[in-house]
Image: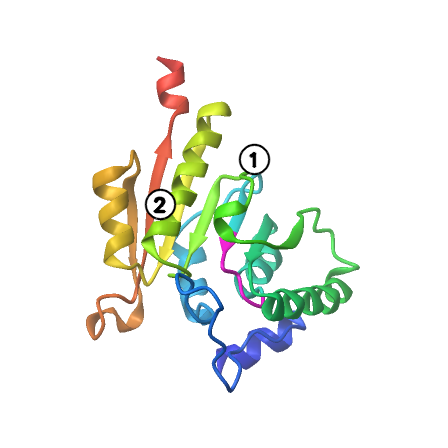
Amino acid sequence: MKDKYYDKLLHIHTMEDKKTIYPEFQQYNPYEPTPYNALEKLTKHYTFDKQDTVIDFGCGKGRLPFYLHYFQHISVTGIEMDTHFFHAAQHNLQSYQQLIRSENNQANIQFICSLAEEYNIGATDNRFYFFNPFSVNIFKRIISNILISVKDVPREIDIILYYPHQTYIHFLEHNSPFELLTEIKLKSYWLNPDERIMVYRYDNTLFEAK
């Protein structure tokens, strides 16, 4: 089972709790980590650059940040509003750092306990990951925050959606400057069309150059 294999490899524990924990805020969804096979497919069909900084909104115990940091050597920040999962991610980080202590991985990995919409988008943040962590209303606020940041510091931005909700897709395609870059269909897509990864891109450096 890949969950156990990768968790053991990375010295972390990111599997779901036996008892589902529901967030205190109604617009946030319960914890469910991205399957490792989806992360494998993502990194196979989508290219991360060493200069990228990934923000994982609703990171839970940190599965995606650890996976990308270890295999892609890129900087990753996990944003988690639930203190239970934030502390679990911090505990995983301590164990993970023991693993990579002797490796030459200069990329940064960190976790921030914060509501996603209150996270201050950094000037180098350029890849944003979502696995349906909250309502589309919160998603819209975050996209607005991203666009304000990009206006101040022009750069290429990618929005990465796993198991994308139709409300997210509709908003990006009809009410934002983002355009579909690629769609990655997962193994079980033919049984469940939601089993896919969609990447949307906006690059305002193209407009600045004109």
Write down the region rendered in magenta.
56-61
Looking at the rendered structure, the kind of residue marked 2 is Lys
Asked if residue 59 lies in the magenta stretch, the reply is yes
Asked if residue 152 lies in the magenta stretch, the reply is no
Q: Majority secondary structure of the magenta segment?
A: loop
Question: In the figure, is residue 176 to the left or right of 91?
Answer: left
Q: What x and y, as percent, mark residue 78?
A: 57, 55
Q: What x and y, as percent, mark residue 193?
A: 21, 67
Residue under pointer 2: 140
Image quarter of the C terminus? top left
Residue at image x 63%, y 73%? 9
The quadrant in which residue 38 appears is bottom left
Q: What x and y, as percent, mark residue 189?
A: 25, 69
Q: Earlier in the sequence, mark 1 or mark 2?
A: 1
Numbered label attached to residue 14: none
Mark 2 residue crowding within 10 angstroms, few (<14) / some (14–19) / many (20+)? some
Mark 1 residue crowding within 10 angstroms, few (<14) / some (14–19) / many (20+)? some
Q: Is residue 129 above or below residue 37?
A: above
Q: Residue furthest bottom?
A: 18
Question: In the figure, is residue 175 to the left or right of 18?
Answer: left
Its colouring scheme is rainbow
Numbered label attached to residue 124: 1
The residue closer to the viewer here, 200 or 120, is 120
Q: Is residue 182 above or below residue 150?
A: below
The residue closer to the viewer here, 47 or 36, is 36
Q: What x and y, as percent, mark residue 61?
A: 58, 68
The quadrant in which residue 99 appears is bottom right
Looking at the rendered structure, the kind of residue marked 1 is Thr
Q: Is residue 28 above or below residue 75?
A: below
Residue at image x 61%, y 76%? 13
As measured in the structure, the alpha-carbon distance from the residue carrying label 1 to the one carrying label 2 is 20 Å
State which mark lies toward you, 1 or 2: 2
